[in-house]
Structure formats: C-alpha cells, structure tokens
Image: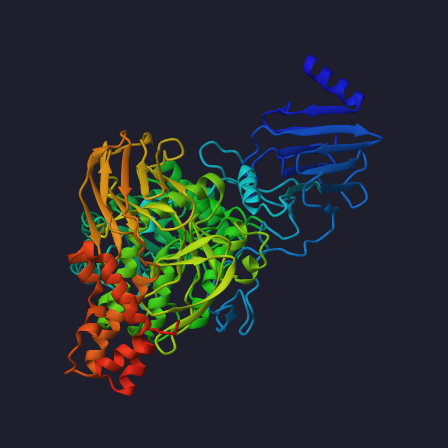
Amino acid sequence: MKKKLLFLLCILQGVLSVSQAQNTQRNIAYTDANVRFSVISDGVLRLEYASDGVFVDDASHLAVNRLYPQATYQLKTSGGWIEIATPKMKMRYKKNSGQFTDRNLVITAAKGASPFTWKPGIQQKGNLKGTYRTLDGMDGDTQSQTWVADTKQGEKLKLEDGLLATDGWTFIDDSKGLLFDNDPDWNWVKERPANGGQDWYFMTYGRDYKAALKDYTLFSGKVPLPPRYAFGYWWSRYWLYSDKEFRNLIDNFHTYQIPLDVLVVDMDWHYTEKGKGGWTGWTWNRDLFPNPKQFLGYLKDNKVKVTLNLHPADGVASYEENYSGLAADMGIDPQSKQTIPWINSDKKFMQKMFKHILTPMEKDGVDFWWLDWQQGIYDPKVKNLSNTWWINYSFFTQMEQHRETRPMLYHRWGGLGNHRYQVGFSGDAVVSWKSLDFQPYFNATASNVLYGYWSHDLGGHIGSKIDPEMYTRWLQFGALSPIMRTHSQKSAGLNKEPWVFNKEYGDILRKTIRQRYEMAPYIYTMARKGYDEGLSLCRPMYYDYPDSREAYDFRSEYMFGDDMLIAPATAPVKDGYLQMHVWLPEGEWYEWDTGTLLTGGQVVERPFAIDEYPIYVKAGAVLPLYTEKVMNLSGNDEDVVVTVFPGGKDSSSFTLYEDNGNDKKYASEYALTKLTSSRQGQEQTVVIGRREGQYADMPSSRSFKVKLLSSLVPQSVTVNGHPAKYVYSGEEFALVIDLPAMPCNQEKVVKVVYPTETVQLNGVLGVSNRIAKSMELLKYRDSYICFKEEFGKMGSLHEAVSYAPAELPTLLAEFWKSYNDLPEVLKRQGLNEANAKWFLQSVGWTAK
C-alpha cells in the first residue's frame, strides 16, 4: 500500500525518475483503466490499449516473453499528457483519449539520438527486408514454374519486411496475433479476445542494427543453438535409395576421407497407398529397408545423424502400421479404415501422433525431422493460424520437452517468431547461376528476422544435369553458409557425390567440405553468439558498417561471423578466372586463398580461379580451427589450431566457445578460452588462456597447434619459457608449432622471435600455387617439354621452402625476380608464342 501511495504522490508531482523499474516483473511504466505502457529496453516500448481494461499477459506467438531486464526511463504526467522517456526515445500520449491514433500518440528520438518522429499511420521508407517461406520454383529471384502457389510464373520474389530499416525505427502490430494458453504440460494455441484492443511494439535503434536484434529477442525469444553436428556436411538427394545403397554411400565417404555428419532420407523411405503414389507416409518401406532399426543402428555406429522427410498433410491412412492404436486413441473405429486427418491445431491428435508413430521412430534412431509442409497455408479450425508456423512449433517443443538431446528441426519459414525453431529448408530452386547468385543475399537478409539457419539445396534442385563449375562454386558458397547440405530432384543427371566428378573438380569439392570442418570451432562460437545476441552467422555488411553506402549496395557480400567477409563467386570464369569487384571496408583484409594482404576502404578488382574463393579475414585475427583429420563433429576433444593471420593491430583476441555439443544445458553449462596474439618489434606472443566454465563430458586436457600464416622462419620459439619444436610449411608459408596435450586450466604462452630481415610474403601463396598448377597443365600441351632451371624452380617453390626453410629469403627473392620478368623467362625457356600466351593467361600474370 505504501508503494502505491508513493507512486501516486510522484504522479501528482509530475515527475517519476526510474533507474530500476518499479515493476521489475513486467517493467510497466504506466497503466490506467484502458492503456498500459511497458519499457522492454531503452529501445523498445510495448503499447497496449484495451477498451474493457483487460490487458494481455499471456505469451503471444510473436512475443513469448513478458518479463524483461530492468530498464532506465522517466515518467512524467503534465497537462493531460503521459510522457515516457528512455535514453533513445520519448513517447507522449494524451491521457484518457482512447485508442492510439496520430492525434493522441507521438514518439520522437531522444536528445542526441538519430532524429525521427513517428505517429500511428506513418510508414517506413527504408525497410531492409526479411525472408520468405520458400524458394520453390525460383530461378534466382524470379518464379519459373506454374505449380507453385506462392508466386506466379514470371513474378519477382517479394521478401517480407524485416525488423530493420534505414529509418532507424520499426513498428510491430501484434493486436491480432494468436496467443498461448499457458498449459503447463504443453502450451497450445488460443485466439485473442475480440475486444478491438491494440498491442503494439515500437523499436528505435538508429543505425545500431545489432542492438535492435538483441532487443527483439527480449520479447520474442532467443534463437536456440543447434547441436554441433548441424554445422557439418549433410548429404541429401531425392532418390530411391535402399539400405544397401546408403551403406555403399557411407563407405565411399570413408574411402575418399570426406567428412559427413547428417544423412537426409527423402520421402521414399516410406510406403504410400499401393498403386496411388502420394507424398504422405509413416511406415518404413521394407522392400528398401528390410530392418529399419538395424539400418539406423548402422548409421549410429558410423556417427552419422539421420533425418526423415515428412509430408504430413494427408493424415494417417489405414494401411499404416500403427494406424489401429492411433485411431482407437482418437475415438475412431479402426475397422472403419477412415483416414485420420492431419489438423495441426488438434492437440489430442498431435499428442497421439507422437505417442504411436513419431516417438517410437525417434527411439529407434531418428535424430530429427524434415517437415516439408507444402499444403494449406492456414489451419481449418483456428482462424489465421499458419500451418507452417504451428507444425514447426509443435514438433520443436515436443522434442524439447521429451528428449534428452538438443531439439532441432528442418522446415519452411512460417513467419515472425519462427526463429525459435531453427533450421529452414528453402525449397526447390532451379539449377542456374541466377539461383546461386541470389542465395547469398537471401541468406544474409533473413538475419533481419533472426532466421539465421537457412539450408539450401546446394547445387540447385530443379534441373536435369550438372555444370561442374557451377556446382563447385555452389558448394564453396555452401561451406560458408549456415547449413551445408546438397540436394536435388529425382534425376539421374543430378548426382552430386564428389567422387563422380573428374579429378580437378572432385579434389576441390573434397577440399571444400574438409575446409568446412576445419572452420567448425569458429563457426560454432559464432553460432553461440546467435543465441546470446541474436546475430546470425551470415550477416549483411550494414550491421558492422551502417554508415557506408557500399554496405547496402554490395548486397551479396556478407560477414561470416565477426572476422570473415565473404564476396561470393557466383558467375562462370572467363579465360580461367572470375574477375570480381569486391568492396573491402576500412582496415586491412587478408585474402585467405591467395595470401594477399589488402587495404580496405575501397573497391578492389580481384581474379579468382575455380580452386580459389573470395574469403577475407580481418588482418591480425586469431581464430580457432580444427586440423584436416576431423571427419565428424561428434567429439569434444579435437585438436585446435590457433591460427594467426598477418597484419592488423598490435594485438587481437578471440574467445573460443565449447559445450557438450548435443545436450540441452548449453545456456548455463559451457566453457570459454581466450586466445590472444600480440606483436612488439620482432617478437610475437600467442596466449591460449585458461579455460573457464564447465560442461558434461568436458575433456580435462587438449592438444593445440599454433599456426602463423605468411610467416618468416623464426630465430626461436618457446612455449611457457621452454624451447619448442616447430615446422615451417612451405605449402602454406606458415609456421606451425605443436603443443603437447596440456591441462585446459593451464595457460599456454607461445613466443616467437623473428629475424630482422624483410621478405616479400604478400601474395606469394596464390601466385606460387597458380604457377605450379599451370606448369603441370603445360605438360599436357607439350609433353616433351624439359624445364630449364630458371623456370623449373618456380614450380617447386613450396617443396624447396619445406626442405630448406632457412633458405626462404633467397628462394623468395629468386621467385619474385623470375615472376616479375615472366614473359622473358618464358622466352628463355623456349616456349612458342601460343604456349607463352596461354601460360601468362593461366597464371593471371599482369605487368607490374
């Protein structure tokens, strides 16, 4: 009572300053008979009007959280107006004036913030867009098919509005949004009271897009962290596979030493009604899989997770194995053979569906489900309930409640709030360069609604044959996407197994998949950031560089986590190279595949051969990677390669994240290890800090390597003050220091002392690789060629450096001298004009 009196006294005085909100449960700043204003954060307000005075406290499908962190604001009432001010905005509402309109409500920027004025009815001008339910039938951003219901043939894809806009504010109307019923056993859908109420959210953020996304998670929920295996390679193909064929497939992955984590089994795993075909089925096809449980056990023995495709819309027919039990529980006479309809909003049906059909298969070994919902948009019983949204919710939360492992789904986008159910399936895109070119933008822009885990049919779906170059570029993009999954329609010409391609492409595909695994510790750490801060793995450039026009104009470029910039290669090469214009923001950037350090703040033109990709790493970055030995992401004790990139500031750091990998306790049970690199004069120090934290099955010790790229050969190397052995890799021009397994709670300090001499390492990796590759190809143009010493030495630089690292300065000086004079070297070699011209073009040589 005293608190209420004090509150009323402050209102009468006209000012209430609140640094720690009075109502810490809901941060309600003001309420009366008809309106309620809550401060979710300094950048988000919830505004409610209820003519009957009954406000909504139940969670909605959009806003699942009603409890917020304490917020700072000021409340004033003066002259009949209510004013709420936060550090970012000021809201004014005319007291007792009814529903919110442009006459009684206005929100403006706080002093010093990016200026704006908003009233109800004002529309954004610069929305940065979100995502879309499916890319079915899309050739790039244009619909090419007649069978797709979402868009008409020839129509451009219109992405939904996202949460961000260059206006610096966003208005969200949840007035008609469906609610949850607060059933403690399983929250279910319920309709909102039809009282004409208003339930609004207003977000302001200026150009701080990252803050806006994190604020959104305060009321709409976090993005759950997928299990670690999700970031490995997924094999998927629409094909009439049998048990034996899948075993042969897995054997080939082992034979060619290609990593694999997930096997996607498309719809032919189940029976359909005899002679009628169809999409829906719930019973294993024993003509193809005589013993499903043993097949699933075989996959587990090979550390491969499995998901099965479901098209649920046609319900459960009488020929399904578990029909009788389900029918009886649903009050249907099994003898009637009546098909049990699939109704997403029918809670009893969904519970019994899991009990009789889905949960038994999960116990047999199915790890998660592929929900391929293509049918009716809305539920037949609950008005405006999206079938896609609700089936995603029901499957995910059922797994969350009843399984020990981390829940994950693979499904279509259902709308705002669907970020809480993770991995998306983007649908059946056309096999074309246009489709490849569109997907990087589509990926990154989806992060504007926190839908950061799109999984594409890498290589395209609709087509009849594969262009090896296009597929290679698509897979390279896939390795730098949230989920790396290949797939295609049922066509003999669309087999994407890496070993069916010729050696050139097969080697690149294998290398690309292995590269994905080497990057896994970095990727998984960034995925945790998605959970903590709402930042997706693939992000538009304007998150980090909001004031640069290029960040919006170069829409295909994206940040891959905090430290990598990707400029996707999405067009065929010409004369051996794809010439690309790449925007590099301010600072220095290391072009990973060529070993070239470039100055940012400009657009650069760069050539890329088919085995090179435009990956740019912030200069000086120190990143955790795996070794090439990792074939699966199920382990917690893999060796970590602390990789230091050249250039940049005097010091940099990265915090490595670890957890169990597949348990549900990651929110509180995890470990962090800080990695730092600093350089003073000729001495570089790399510190692997003490691990902090705890999680189940955490290894007590771990082996590390420290790799310094574009490195000189050192004078000395010590680990914790003791001399240490090292290897200089001429293949990568990198210094590699092996640290024996040590307790993870012990700090490791690596010190490297370099000589004072200057050596030109910038770009030598790419140039020497191109020279060696072209010299090998030259032999096929002139099989009896005999390389003269001057020319021949250029092709064996890597080996020469590896055998005699101490000779690095001399070897590089000779190499660069010959390279800069390459046309004359070719003349002295005796190449005819045609071969000389070809060779210069093959290595991308240009006069300096």
Q: State the scheme by which the image is colored.
A: rainbow
Quadrant of the rendered image containing residue 27: top right
User: Which of the image's four quarters has the C terminus?
Assistant: bottom left
| Residue closer to the observer: 348 or 527 | 527
Note whether 840 is above or below 19 in the view shown.
below
The residue under the point 73% across, 37% down is 91
Note whether 785 is above or below 437 in the view shown.
below
Note whether 465 is above or below 357 in the view shown.
below
What percent of the width, then of the height, locates residue 180?
54, 38
Q: In the displayed orientation, state which residue is furthest to the bottom.
A: 833
| Residue closer to the observer: 470 or 568 | 568
Tell me: 512 left or right of 423: left
Q: In the displayed orientation, state which residue is furthest to the right.
A: 79
The residue under the point 62% across, 52% down is 165
| Residue closer to the observer: 18 or 577 | 577
Does residue 72 appear anywhere in the picture?
yes
Quadrant of the rendered image containing residue 615: bottom left
What percent of the width, then of the height, locates residue 205?
62, 44
Q: In the displayed orientation, state which residue is furthest to the front.
A: 757
Tell me: 87 left or right of 550: right
* Badge count: 0
Tell me: 730 left or right of 85: left
